[in-house]
Image: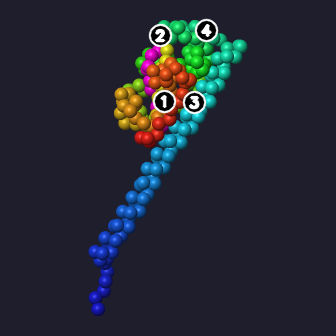
């Protein structure tokens, strides 16, 4: 009688097939979790931004708020409210903020946004956009500029508009808003 000390080819092939199936299932679940996490972060951030911007709009109409003509040259026809020594323009339609998109390094708009809401975002204008949340101005006109907030992505500023995994703030008067109230749009197709 011959002693059997190894595996047959059939046993090895079956084991490889089973391991392959299990790894395919596990990796697809992992990718689903990553996608779900990105979407959850964007939804939560959108809710925080909407609440903070509604509170901002209420602050604008309070009697003790400091409201004056904006001093920044490209927004001088707008009215601004001063919060924590930061001047922020607002829409006459709904009193929501219109962030100042200049200088082009996002520094002024980030300062304004952070005076309205506590948010941790990367603002490196040309990328790399490798933080959990990244920020870029959507420069329509200085008096109607919006912004994008989006998760980690490969690419540069020119790729953001077509990247469909982001929050897009479109203030009243923006060319994509047709004079309606300011709004946040959540895009999740590419997440």
Which residue is more in the foreground, 185 or 62? 185
- Discs 4, 3 touching: Cβ within 8 Å: no
* Quarter that holds the N terminus: bottom left
Query: Which of disc 3 and disc 4 is earlier in sequence?
Result: 3
Magenta stretch: residue 133 in it?
yes
Which residue is more in the foreground, 181 or 143? 181
Residue drawn at x 34%, y 71% is: 14
Determine which residue is flagged by label 1. 168
- Discs 2, 4 touching: Cβ within 8 Å: no
Query: Where residue 29 sits: x, y (%)?
Result: 46, 54
Determine which residue is flagged by label 3. 49
- Discs 1, 3 touching: Cβ within 8 Å: no
- Discs 2, 3 touching: Cβ within 8 Å: no
Query: Which corner quadrant of the image does residue 88 belong to?
Result: top right
Residue drawn at x 50%, y 41% is: 39
The answer to whether residue 110 is visible is: no
Disc 1 element? strand
Q: Is residue 153 above or below residue 138?
A: below
Q: Identify the mark at residue 68; answer none if there is no mark.
A: 4
Query: Which of disc 4 and disc 1 is earlier in sequence?
Result: 4
Disc 3 element? helix
Could you give the CA–CA distance between mark 2 and mark 1, rounded to whole angstroms? Answer: 22 Å
Q: Count neighbours of disc 2 (C-alpha within 10 A) and say few if under 14, some if 14 to 19, many if 20 or more.
A: some
Disc 2 element? helix
Which residue is more in the foreground, 24 or 124? 24
Q: Is residue 142 above or below residue 159?
A: above
What residue span does the magenta drawing correspond to?
132-142
Q: Count neighbours of disc 4 (C-alpha within 10 A) and say few if under 14, some if 14 to 19, many if 20 or more.
A: some
């Amino acid at each position: 009688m011959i002693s059997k000390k190894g595996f047959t080819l059939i046993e090895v092939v079956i084991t490889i097939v089973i391991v392959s199936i299990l790894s395919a299932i596990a990796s697809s679940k992992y990718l689903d979790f990553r996608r779900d996490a990105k979407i959850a972060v964007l939804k939560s951030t959108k809710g925080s931004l909407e609440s903070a911007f509604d509170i901002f709009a209420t602050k604008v109409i309070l009697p003790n708020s400091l409201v004056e003509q904006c001093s920044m040259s490209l927004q001088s026809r707008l009215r601004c409210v001063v919060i924590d020594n930061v001047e922020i323009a607002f829409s006459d339609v709904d009193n929501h903020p219109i962030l100042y998109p200049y200088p082009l390094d996002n520094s002024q708009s980030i300062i304004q946004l952070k005076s309205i809401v506590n948010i941790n975002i990367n603002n490196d204008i040309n990328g790399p956009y490798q933080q959990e949340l990244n920020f870029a101005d959507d420069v329509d006109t200085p008096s109607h500029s919006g912004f994008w907030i989006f998760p980690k992505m490969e690419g540069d500023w020119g790729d953001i508009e077509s990247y469909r995994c982001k929050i897009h703030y479109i203030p009243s008067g923006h060319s994509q808003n047709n004079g309606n109230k300011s709004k946040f749009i959540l895009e999740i197709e590419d997440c």
